[in-house]
Amino acid sequence: MIRVLQVLQGGDEFGGVETFVYQYYSHLDRTKTHFDFAFCYGDTMKDRWDDPVLKDSQHMVLNISGRNMFQLYRSLRACLRSGHYDCIHVNTGNLSIQVPAQIAAKREGVKIRIAHSHSIGSRNGRNPIRDCITKVLQHLIVDNATKLVACSVEAGEHLYGADAAKNRTQIIPNAIDIGEFAYDETLRQKKREELGLEGHKTYIQVGNLQPVKNHEFTLEVFKSVMAREKDSILLLAGTGMLEASLKEMVMAGHMEANVRFLGYRTDVNELLQTADIMLMPSKWEGFPIAVIEAQVSGTTVLCSDNIPRSVDVTGRCEFLPLEAKRWEEACLAAVPRKEDLSWKIRENGFDVDTATERFAALYTG
């Protein structure tokens, strides 16, 4: 059996990276490949360890202080030494995690060392000194990892630099279980009735309530949309650190009747069936899985221009600068066109059943 230590940044909420790892692990032959998990800052899978996919996995929280790379290096060396792992798979664009993790694994003799970039991050406000430090850290990752992986070309360039992204990086798609998201008119009508959405144009944003997801911008835009589409509804699926302040913003804007905080959901596939328009005004993303999920059922997606264009695999995505008036007009102009676009998603390589073979190959030499 191949033993793999999955290293995640961790925190408070189960997010896109966790979804990615879980999705693929659920489709792997777990009699041949075994995952354990190490979280740097908090166990984001704490509510899922009874899941049949994860019940045999060990999970370790390293409780790293800030960006203490030396503490992380020592902690991971101890984990790797005790677990006798064949592979380490480090799932983050955080340089202060990737660098010590790759060096620790190399020192412990782990043969397969995978760096995996899931985001393009933010490089706003960079200065020459910081840029120089970034390049040094990127070289340390490239020199110590045996495999460089990314969810998109842009995410690879962010973590490894342009040369390594072009010459060494393998793109592994953020694949999904297409069957769960395929359009079903009966399910759509049932769920819309359950949520009281009949006769309402319905917008949705899926994602943890964190600054990067830019929910404040969504609410700013929706307040203007609501003034012109009085029956429109905005669904916010997710939890996070900004929940209280966002609810205050809704109350201050007198939007309580039109904005619904749904919390953490396990029925996102059904929610996407109900929605007419998805909003994704993120400040940055690597390759958002939720956008692929939405497109399966033909949902129109309005994306910020910070998101890689390659996420549009059906022609249903529109990319906009983060200017509220532009988004308001795009929302009002968007016409729901729900239909089953599973074939397009599958044709573009995002079916987890077929993509799993490529993913499994990461751990075999």
Image (cartoon, rainbow, N blue to C red):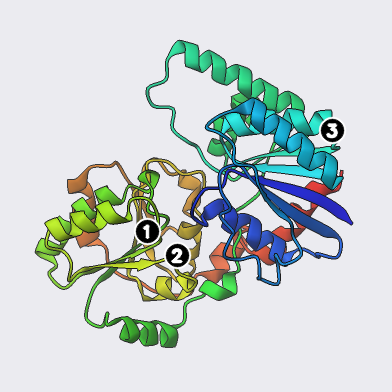
Tell me the residue at 49%/64% (across/down): 293
Q: Give SS at disc 3.
A: loop
Q: Give SS at disc 2.
A: helix
Query: How many angstroms separate mark 3 from mark 2 (CA)?
Result: 42 Å
Q: Which mark is residue 301?
A: 1
Relative side of 278 to 168, left or right: left
Residue hosting label 2? 294
Relative side of 12 to 226, left or right: right
Where, by quadrant of the figure, is residue 75 drawn? Answer: top right
Query: How many angstroms separate mark 3 from mark 1 (CA)?
Result: 45 Å
Total numbered labels placed on residues in the image: 3
Residue 217 position, x and y percent, is 25, 48
**Mark closest to the chain's N terminus, 3 or 2:** 3
Q: Give SS at disc 1.
A: strand
Labelled pair 2, 1 in contact (Cβ < 8 Å): yes
Where, by quadrant of the figure, is residue 103 drawn? Answer: top right
